[in-house]
């Protein structure tokens, strides 16, 4: 493997240099432990090692190199060398070496390649079936990927020999193959799980949450929840070997520490830096910034089941009370874009003329509050995830701005597990500030949960049956023109209902040390096995 001689880069003053050196030494631990692994610093700790429970883009991405999936996204040939991206609309074989689709679009038959888990246990069609059933039984986010969407269902799963499996859906599901790229639909080492956790699904989930049962390009050497994840190349991996045979992922929720380590050359890759910190590194020697538009956003889901947030007039008032341009300037720092609507600018269904951002207009906001009949102050908790500094900055700006319309916003920072539970609560009594984006970048996928009545991962518990009916029709509409007309109707309905506040559409950013020559990422796949240096 490549072992980089890490170095502290010069800083402005001797005092700052001393502080920087002390902080880096405290965070990195023994020098030998740091130098022998490719170092990845991440702001957001994992909620769990269980792919069935992974809900955020951060968690899905970090687990994607640990568990195999039947298919994967293709490389985007238009992306730049050294910072490649994956397509979001085309898949290629992975654990499944080939597949066929029935004429009615409901049955997919997969032929598996010969593969084994690190334990030596074989990957068989029956293991795939068991893995998917366990995910469905667990009820976590992974269920959506196994079925091909939150509104899709499996009619049957038939094992047709050791390496052939056929899945029949209750109706054609255009996003099905795209969904199977996610680690939420991963294949687990069944015999290893049964050996350590037995047949009880709850006990299995508890064990997998902190133990490795995968078979991706990396295996887990050690996992300290909230602190670090050590990986080694999987000797049983059937694909191309990882560029770096040993990797350490360090979870560092303090943005200042993350920045110091990136600037000082202590991390090969840094993920989750605040946009302000990323901007401060722009043009600095020794680092390279990856900056690409993505299907992700920072939004505030409002508790639409809780008065007075159940009134669209009051929710609309908060959108006009939100200084979006200030948030873009002071938080996004050029790595974001303003809009207002259910689809961000990267979506094919996005229409600029229907999704223009709402101006900051405190007078109009107060007028709407008065029309809603709201008197006196309104208290509201807003939850942010530990390690996402941008969310705290956004919440702080909103806290000041919303005072003008009588909303006392209380900021609550939650751990990864607490935050995941709050986001998935079916009846939220709080606001959720969420860095979000669909794992499958289609309007059909995002409307299957993000705007759907009764879905726990609808960030606002928002419900408009007319919108749901339009979304269901659009997902199976063969005509592109008619389908876009439905998405436009949905945009108008959603915008009129104002179920959430949009901070901005967010660019994906990562900071790479200048030694890093290879970097690949997708919407919900980090492809860490393809990160490294060839020098």
Image (cartoon, rainbow, N blue to C red):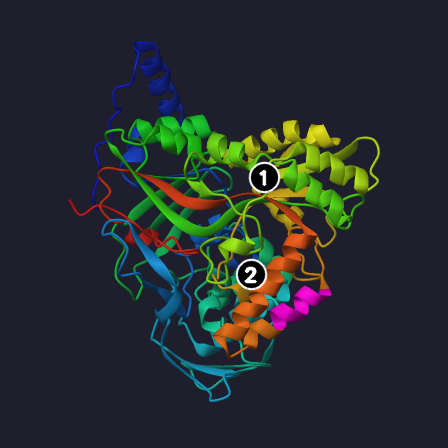
Real-space CA distance between mark 1 and mark 2, rounded to the nearest whole angstrom: 26 Å
What kind of element bears circle 1?
loop
- In which quadrant of the rendered view does residue 354 lie? bottom right
Neighbour tally class for label 1: few under 14, some 14-19, many 20 plus, Cα within 10 Å: some
Please state which of the two labelled residues, at mark 1 or mark 2, is closer to the viewer: 1
Q: Which range is magenta?
A: 465-472
Q: Which residue is mark 1?
A: 359
Q: Residue at x 68, y 42 (%)?
A: 431
What kind of element bears circle 2?
helix
Neighbour tally class for label 2: few under 14, some 14-19, many 20 plus, Cα within 10 Å: many
Dominant secondary structure, magenta? helix
| Disc assigned to residue 446 | 2
User: Would you place residue 45 above or below residue 329 in this image?
Assistant: below
Q: Does the rendering let one see residue 139?
A: yes
- In which quadrant of the rendered view does residue 247 lie? top left
Contact between marks 1 and 2 (CB within 8 A): the answer is no
x%, y% of residue 226?
Answer: 51, 39
What residue occupies the far bottom of the structure in this picture? Answer: 103
x%, y% of residue 446?
Answer: 56, 61
Q: Residue at x 46, y 62 (%)?
A: 348
């Amino acid at each position: 493997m490549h072992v980089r001689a890490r170095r502290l880069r010069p800083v402005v003053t001797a005092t700052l240099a001393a502080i920087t050196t002390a902080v880096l030494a405290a965070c990195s631990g023994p020098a030998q432990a740091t130098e022998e692994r490719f170092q990845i610093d991440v702001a957001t700790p994992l909620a769990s090692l269980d792919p069935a429970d992974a809900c955020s883009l951060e968690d899905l991405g970090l687990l994607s190199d640990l568990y195999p999936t039947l298919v994967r996204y293709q490389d985007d040939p238009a992306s730049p060398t050294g910072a490649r991206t994956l397509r979001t609309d085309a898949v290629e074989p992975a654990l499944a070496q080939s597949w066929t689709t029935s004429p009615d679009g409901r049955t997919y038959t997969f032929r598996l390649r010969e593969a084994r888990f690190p334990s030596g246990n074989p990957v068989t069609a029956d293991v795939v079936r068991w893995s998917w059933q366990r995910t469905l039984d667990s009820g976590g986010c992974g269920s959506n990927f196994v079925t091909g969407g939150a509104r899709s269902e499996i009619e049957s799963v038939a094992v047709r020999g050791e390496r052939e499996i056929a899945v029949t859906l209750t109706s054609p599901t255009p996003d099905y193959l795209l969904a199977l790229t996610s680690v939420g639909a991963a294949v687990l080492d069944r015999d290893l799980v049964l050996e350590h956790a037995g047949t009880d699904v709850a006990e299995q989930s508890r064990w997998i949450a902190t133990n490795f049962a995968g078979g991706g390009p990396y295996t887990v050497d050690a996992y300290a929840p909230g602190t670090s994840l050590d990986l080694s190349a999987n000797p049983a991996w059937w694909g191309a070997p990882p560029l770096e045979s040993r990797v350490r992922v360090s979870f560092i929720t303090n943005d200042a520490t993350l920045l110091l380590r990136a600037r000082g050359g202590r991390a090969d890759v840094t993920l989750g830096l605040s946009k302000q910190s990323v901007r401060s590194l722009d043009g600095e020697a020794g680092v390279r910034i990856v900056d690409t538009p993505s299907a992700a956003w920072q939004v505030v889901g409002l508790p639409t089941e809780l008065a007075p947030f159940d009134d669209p007039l009051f929710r609309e008032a908060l959108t006009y009370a939100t200084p979006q341009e200030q948030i873009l300037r002071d938080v996004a720092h050029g790595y974001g874009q303003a809009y207002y609507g259910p689809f961000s600018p990267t979506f094919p269904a996005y229409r600029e003329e229907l999704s223009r951002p709402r101006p900051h207009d405190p007078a109009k906001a107060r007028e709407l509050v008065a029309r809603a009949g709201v008197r006196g102050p309104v208290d509201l908790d807003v939850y942010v995830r530990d390690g996402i500094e941008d969310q705290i900055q956004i919440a702080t700006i909103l806290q000041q701005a919303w005072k003008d319309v009588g909303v006392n916003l209380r900021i609550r920072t939650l751990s990864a597990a607490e935050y995941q539970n709050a986001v998935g609560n079916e009846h939220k009594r709080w606001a959720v500030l969420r860095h979000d984006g669909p794992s499958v970048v289609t309007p059909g996928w995002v409307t299957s949960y993000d705007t759907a009545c009764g879905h726990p991962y609808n960030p606002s518990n928002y419900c408009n049956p007319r919108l749901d009916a339009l979304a269901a029709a659009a997902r199976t509409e063969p005509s592109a023109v008619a389908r876009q007309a439905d998405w436009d109707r949905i945009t108008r309905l959603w915008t009129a209902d104002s179920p959430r506040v949009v901070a901005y559409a967010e660019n994906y950013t990562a900071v790479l040390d200048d030694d890093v020559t290879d970097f690949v990422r997708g919407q919900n796949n980090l492809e860490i096995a393809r990160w490294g240096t060839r020098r």
